[in-house]
Image (cartoon, rainbow, N blue to C red):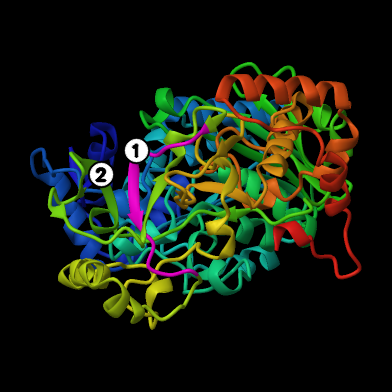
Amino acid sequence: MKVFEANITDQVSYFLNDTLKNTFSLEKANQEIFDRFGIRFFFNNDEELETLKKLISDTCISVEEPDRAEFGDFQTNLDLANKITIYLASKNISPELVIEPTCGKGNFIIASLNNFPDIKYLYGIEIYKPYVWESKFNIIDFFLSNPHVNKPEILIVHCNVFDFDFKKIAKEHSINNILVIGNPPWVTNSKLGSLNSKNLPKKTNFKNHSGLDAMTGKGNFDIAEFITMTMIQTFQNLKGNLLLLVKNSVIKNIIFDQSKNKFKISSIEKLCIDSKKEFNVSVEAALFYCKLNSPPTFECREFDFYENQVSKIKFGWLNDKFVSNIETYIHTKEIDGKCPFVWRQGLKHDCSSVMELDKVNGYYVNGLNEEVKLEEGLVYGILKSSDLKNEVINHSRKFTIVTQKSIGQDTKYIKTEYPETYQYLKDHTSYFEARKSSIYINKPLFSIFGIGDYSFKSYKVAISGLYKTFHFTLILPQDDKPVMLDDTCYLVGFDKIEYAIYTLILLNSDLTMRFLQSVTFPDAKRTFTKDILMRIDLLELAKQISKAELLTKIELLNIKYKLNVKLELWDSFIKEMIPRNSGQMAIFA
């Protein structure tokens, strides 16, 4: 049965019907519910009281379940909520005040009432009104079935979590032992924006990203991360604990930002759960636990929630380095420094149906299945992350049009120097104008990003940012032209094949692989990023390898890929990597 679009058990329905049928005063109705169950302000107005009385006196009401995507709605089942609160109780946690910032149907509230006997106050905040009612109904149902359980003062508030004043609670309950618990929404601000959702905080760059980072990926934050940071910031000075069920990426970001935030939290744990089993979703998620009002710590122990006796790994900050596995990192830390050249991301155009081409029977064919006639001058081979499987690549399966040699370059030259290419691009102007990213605003027509002198280097060493493959690939020219990479790849370019081969061998060493495994997170959207790659100290790596080993690896590459590389430029390569007074590397300019 549903009332106010909320599930209600027969037990609760019968009780409310018997209790309220002769009650006509809002104040009296609310007082009766408070006296019996501790729930404050059960009804907000007379209309709610009269509507409820009418509905529960009628027969069963069926209401179709609405789409809850905009709320990131993955409700925690009561069994899991009970296991979580039992786990906290096993740590001798017994709060007097429980706060659930996004309480949903109230399962964490019920589990808390069931497993924490010392609760005096309980707050639940929920934006979705039917869930507010369902939480209230579930609380009544719990107490009707467990009449001797302690009944704290309970307030379930219909409110957007971003508008609720949690600081007021912190001030009013400064002496209480608190527990913040719950399961915040598993969505990002961009996802909510695409749904035209109002369930968003006020527009704010809350991590203080600047420039392009704020406009693109790094400006897209997880709503649960915002909520988690708000809870920690608000309650860090109160005695108590926090446990929130969030995506793994949120926990990693919280620990990463702890170096600058220095929140007063300690005993930090990540308790991994099976999201497929618990929520039937393919999302890597875990319980984030910490102790409040304690000296700041900067590392996190990871456990399996179902078998949490032994920590799997420990990640976080070791001195001034952020690592994914502190134990294994210690054995590779000597190469954690600063790369002597700048890693770059591949080119970005956001117009694949027009800009990416196949070559069929000597003709170019675009993603619209149109046969395209172009001059060869602006057409280059391009590789994607999925192409970087071999150690050396000398041809591409795809081609792309490179309209600029540097970001912001005027593209008017195309009309006079490459008229067929210009006509083709002009005929498809609407596709370029439909690009949504703000990076293209007020830029020349047919603009691309991720382009520069480095893009036109003959030899490149590259790695996929998406795949969890710890190997680097050498990219050779195709038809005497450099091959491009797309923006899912990271690269460094060279004019000399010898320098590229030396770099490839160093980066594909066992030491590099073990280092990267100790500083990358397997569940990250991008396993490798520019920040990670810039930590590889290539000069230090070069000190770890003997010339005999280098010669052996060079000969194997020469034989396998018909190259003719020698070791004669090794000393020059080392010399070039030593920083000049200006700090610039001549070969990588």
Query: Residue at coordinates 61% horizontally, 34% vertically from top-left?
Result: 472
Q: Is residue 542 left or right of residue 493?
A: right
Residue type of the residue flagged with mark 2? Asp
Residues 493 and 226: in front is 493
- Residue 223 in percent (x, y) is at 48, 56
Residue type of the residue flagged with mark 1? Arg
Query: Residue at coordinates 46% horizontally, 25% vertically from top-left?
Result: 79
Q: Residue 358 has which mark?
A: 2
How crowded is the residue under tag 2: few (<14 C-alpha within 10 Å), some, or many (20+)?
Answer: many
Query: Residue at coordinates 51% horizontally, 43% vertically from top-left?
Result: 525
- Residue 255 in percent (x, y) is at 71, 48
User: Is residue 395 within the magenta segment?
Assistant: yes
**Earlier sequence position, callout 1 versus callout 2:** 2
Residues 535 and 311: in front is 535
User: What secondary structure is found at the residue carrying circle 1?
Assistant: loop
Q: Quadrant of residue 280?
A: top left
